[in-house]
Image (cartoon, rainbow, N blue to C red):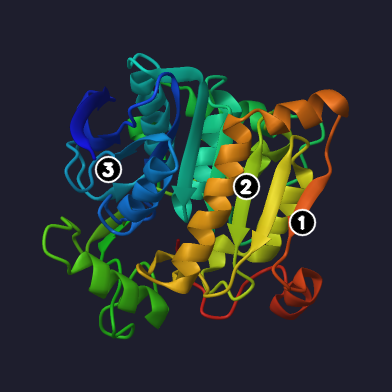
Amino acid sequence: MRIDVEFTSLGATLRGWLYQPDVSLAPVVVMAHGFSATRSMTADKYAEAFYAAGFAVLLYDHRGFGASDGEPRLQVSPWVQARGYRDAVALVSTLDDIDPTRIAVWGDSLSGGVACVAAAVDERISAVVAQVPAFGEKPPPDDADGKLFRALRAAALSPDVLGFGAPIAGPLPVVSVDQVRHPSALKPLTAFRWFSEYGGTLGSEWVNDVTLALGDQPVAWQPGLCASHLGVPVLMLVSPQEEMARANPCVSRIVFDSICSPKEWYAIGGGHFGLLYHPGELFSEAQAIETSFLRRWADGQFQSERNAHPGWSESLQLEAGADHSRVCSEAGMATINGSAEV
């Protein structure tokens, strides 16, 4: 089903799995895990579902995590991760029997926002799937003249991203059951339960330790700024029960509404981690929605809609019964109960 592959990003060897169906010029999905996780912590189950649907898939560990090399180890830097996506895209673009004009990126949690930024700055990427994406606790600042996005884009394309993200916080545990004596990066019990179960699995290569390069030097990481600059189809899966502050669903909705390319919104239950339990009903629901979106993207349906409606910006609502406006009103725009770093 899969083979081991390696590629270089910022001078380090990144390792992943390539799932390649026996078809000519298959569309491909480039995938990376979420905050501090590894490729074997449910991301591989999504990869298997996409492969079964006829897609090639490259799933890899972010630089400094899991099987991938890179120093400093266990440091979360969205700038470094955005570069990783672009280097992974470069790899699949050269592989036999993969269509370089049909490359999608998939991200979960922090990587959901990172994948959107990668798609906004790299024209080789032609679709995005972002599940429970982290766009921040507050809406992105007004950027009518595009100046802030240009600064974000210049930073994302810089060869010096290894030094970005100061001031740096940590090291500290990813999760902890005792926030008084051992405060952690992720505070809700839902995070502790999921990381303990999946990170504790034999061979996961997960370590309960993380350093955060999420500071504002040279510019703040504000992935929502890329919304109006995305020119590709985007699918967002967002939970109204979201418990992570940096994945505020109201902020995700504001970002979504600013996207002018074909887009789909799907509200799913279970909070931040519900769709990461496999096997499970929420996992099955999420992968079915994502596979459907990717199939229609690969078949060219979104391009047809865009050609038929110049300036197309209508969203296809897949709300699954959720009243999002009510959820936003109850949650407030600044912080969600049980706030934590994501």
Mark 1, other Cα within 10 Å: few <14 / some 14–19 / many ≥20: few
**Which residue is denoted by mark 2 in the rendering?**
235
Q: Secondary structure at mark 3?
A: loop
Mark 2, other Cα within 10 Å: few <14 / some 14–19 / many ≥20: many
> Which amino acid, by three-letter code, is at mark 2?
Leu
Q: Nearer the viewer, residue 11 or 100?
A: 100
* Drawn side of residue 278 relative to residue 74, left or right: right
| Mark 2 vs 1, N-terminal side | 2
* Drawn side of residue 340 relative to residue 277, left or right: right
> Which amino acid, by three-letter code, is at mark 3?
Asp
Compared to residue 25, the image places residue 77 above or below, namely: below
Residue 6 position in % (x across, y down) = 20, 28
Compared to residue 113, the image places residue 139 above or below, namely: below
Residue 59 visible in the current orientation: yes
> Which amino acid, by three-letter code, is at mark 1?
Gln
**Which residue is denoted by mark 1 in the rendering?**
317
Residue 251 position in % (x across, y down) = 68, 59
